[in-house]
Image: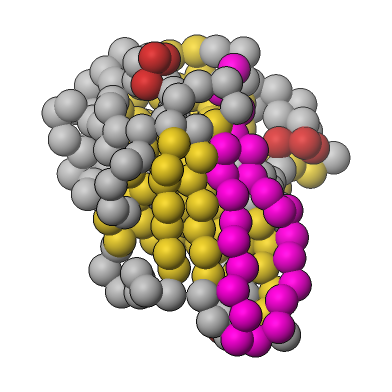
Amino acid sequence: DAKTTQPPSMDCAEGRAANLPCNHSTISGNEYVYWYRQIHSQGPQYIIHGLKNNETNEMASLIITEDRKSSTLILPHATLRDTAVYYCNPGSGNTGKLIFGQGTTLQVKP
Amino acid sequence: GAVVSQHPSRVICKSGTSVKIECRSLDFQATTMFWYRQFPKQSLMLMATSNEGSKATYEQGVEKDKFLINHASLTLSTLTVTSAHPEDSSFYICSARDQSQGSYGYTFGSGTRLTVV
């Protein structure tokens, strides 16, 4: 299973962009990078995923380096409701299991 | 989008009793579901992979006789914590993937807070 490294915590001012990095240097060639977040006492919520190309959806953007060893999740205009623990998880595109690392606790401040 | 329903959301039980937690995929079929547990201020720990119509696959260190998993249909998996003890108190979460959505991410239930007294 690919290992991930994320900073344990980050702060972001409300309305500013939040950039959350993740190192996944052991990711396999066929593994996607998935990002989830968990708000206190709830199940994780899917945010975005990608394989090689950068991706964008209504929640966030995902930037994956060319060598695929790291990625950055971007929340373009962070709100207080984005305060959560953010996890990046390499995973296969089928039914492979998801192993969670320690994640990054993002605190959005007014 | 895909929805996973988990029930109950919280349960308190006496030490020595058993507790069953249900995980349902509401609008898709899931041949595989996953069960996690999470202690306070810690990450999610994968306990087992639940396979429809066959035995679950447990992660190393997880007691299969204590955490019974049944996946009798394509939309329902259950986790039974047998002879529960206070150290089993935790947040239990299930997840599943709608395979018709390709590489789309897993959907998680809202979790079950188990307290053993």
Position of residue B113 measured from the top left corner of the image (x, y, whole percent): 68, 62
In this view, B55 is above or below A14: below
Out of B109 and A72, give the one closest to the viewer.
B109
Q: Which residue lies furthest to the right in this view?
A: A110
Rendered-image quadrant of the C terminus of chain A? top right
Position of residue A5 measured from the top left corner of the image (x, y, whole percent): 36, 51
In this view, A64 is above or below B111: above
Residue at 42 percent across and 43 percent down: it is: B72
Left or right: residue B12 compared with residue A86:
right
In this view, A21 is above or below A104: above
Residue A94 shows in the view: yes
Out of B81 and B105, give the one closest to the viewer.
B81
Is residue B20 magenta-colored?
Answer: yes
Residue at 51 percent across and 52 percent down: it is: B78
Position of residue B8 measured from the top left corner of the image (x, y, whole percent): 71, 53
In this view, A98 is above or below B3: below
Magenta-colored span = B1-24
Left or right: residue A85 compared with residue B34:
right
Residue at 77 percent across and 31 percent down: it is: A79
Position of residue A63 measured from the top left corner of the image (x, y, whole percent): 40, 22
